[in-house]
Image: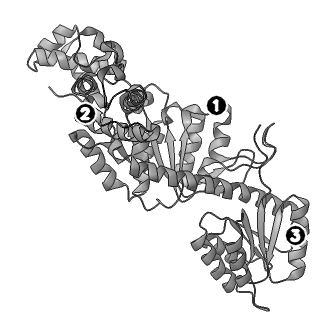
Amino acid sequence: MSAPAEAPRVLVADDQPDVLQAVRLLLKAEGYRVETAGSPAAVARQLQEHDFDVVLLDLNYARDTTSGAEGMDLLRRIRAVHPTLPVVVMTAWGSVEGAVEAMRIGARDYVEKPWDNHRLLATLRAQVELGRALRTARHLEDQNRRLTDDAAPALAAESRAMRDVLAMVRRIAPSDASVLITGEHGTGKEVVARRLHAESARAGRPLVTVHAGGIATGVVESELFGHVKGAFTDARTERIGYFEAAHRGTLFLDEIGTMPMSLQAKLLRVLQTGEFQRVGSTTSRTADVRLISATNLDLHQEVAEGRFRGDLLYRINTVEIHVPALRERREDVPVLADHFLRGFAQRYGKRLQGYDSDAMRALLDYAWPGNVRELAHTVERAVLLAGGERVEAADLNLRPAATARGGGDALEGMPLEEVERHLIRKALDRHGGNVSHAAEALGISRSALYRRLEKHGLET
């Protein structure tokens, strides 16, 4: 049973004592912990002494002044020091221009005086949830950045293929271009996404990761765009979605190829207009988000077979980065293996000096159908089993049937497409690159082999 959520803490800033008292009574009745401040200096002191979930900020402090300049300056200072703290501004003058300017500076929402209690409470509830989500995302992003720094060899660049990937990341990371990362399961697509974010101008903002294939179909729209109270049976409170949580940051949609067609249309609209609606709401919202997607599917084939929208594919793959399978970049295996060995040895308190020659040969001979993820798990197990100063081949417990240099049984450890690619390469090698002879040996026509060469990106 999870612990109950801590009561949200609100800072109410206004230079009118009766306003402070009225808001305090309203919010305390709703279970909020309320602190008040009657001046910009008092706001600064409160923010130094307490952590708040949301600030309700009046824009006008100097008597008989309606410009809101002092409040705007205070808002700027709050945003500079507390970038994830939601601020809701109040204005007694119904000034749309002032509210728009405040939103441009960084306010999350605004209310007019005299306020409607229901709207004020609904606004604060939504912003409290948003603030907590942003702080969680920021914390996770900090962890991600540390992991990215610590795991830099996980994007090993010993091979030409990975050097090309890293060069592409460096070139496009500073832009806001949508990126589609392709590759088999376990190749490190999420690591590439973290690198893109960490090297972008949005690095100080959240990186929100969503595994599109792991969300139940019935709640995908709510997860992405949020919902309002009462939108469906279990919607007891308002909830922000991943797009709002990633505001001014990066949204990483993993396994985007599994997204239902109905939701693909809504995602396309968001990417085209920047606007979306929470489930059950008719109010449009906006979020400034850079989209990075990843898939292990051939989306062009999915489009051809009617399972993925072509117009959405063109939106998400302004730049496409393919992460090669580990068996296609064997030069990286020793670098990755050493990296994982150091990390796991430190985690489990083992003193290991590396791999003996037989163990390293086994690592290089293995086909790695599970790619980098499988290598990491294999090394972790070996670290736990190792009894000496070096990891031995027996500690790795690799299946001979999946070795890259074995006989026909080696194919059992490969995905179907890789088996086809492997057999085509072998046939071409045996026949000196002669397409006609290779096609005859494979039992297919010459034109069929050319189509497969194009599909797999192979050259004769």
Given the current orientation, which residue lies at the most extreme front position? 388
Residue 76 spot, x, y in % from top left: 61, 77
Q: Residue 24 got which mark?
A: 3
The residue type indicated by label 3 comes to: Arg
Badge 1 crowding class, 10 Å Cα cut-off, few under 14, some 14 to 19, many 20 or more, is few
Circle 1 is placed at which residue position? Answer: 217
Residue ID for mark 2: 329
Q: CA distance from mark 1 to mark 2?
A: 36 Å
Residue appearing at x 86%, y 64% in the figure: 27
Neighbor class of circle 3 (other Cα within 10 Å; few <14, some 14-19, many 20+) is many
Contact between marks 2 and 3 (CB within 8 A): the answer is no
- Name the side, left or right, on which 396 lies relative to 14: left
> Which of marks 2 and 1 precedes in the sequence?
1
Above or below 347: residue 363: above
The residue lying toward the viewer, choosing from 44 and 192, is 44
How crowded pointer 2 is (Cα within 10 Å; few <14, some 14-19, many 20+) is rated as some
Residue drawn at x 68%, y 50% is 240
Q: Quadrant of residue 413?
A: top left
Secondary structure of residue under mark 3 = helix
Tell me the quarter of the image containing the C terminus.
Answer: top left
Q: Quadrant of residue 383?
A: top left
What amino acid type is highlighted by mark number 2?
Arg
The amino acid pointed to by label 1 is Thr
- On screen, 268 above or below 216? below
The residue sitting at the bottom extreme is: 64
**Label 3 to label 1: alpha-carbon separation:** 41 Å
Q: Earlier in the sequence, mark 2 or mark 3?
A: 3
Judged from the image, the secondary structure of the residue bearing numbered disc 1 is helix
- For the image, the number of numbered tags is 3
* Element on which disc 2 rests: loop
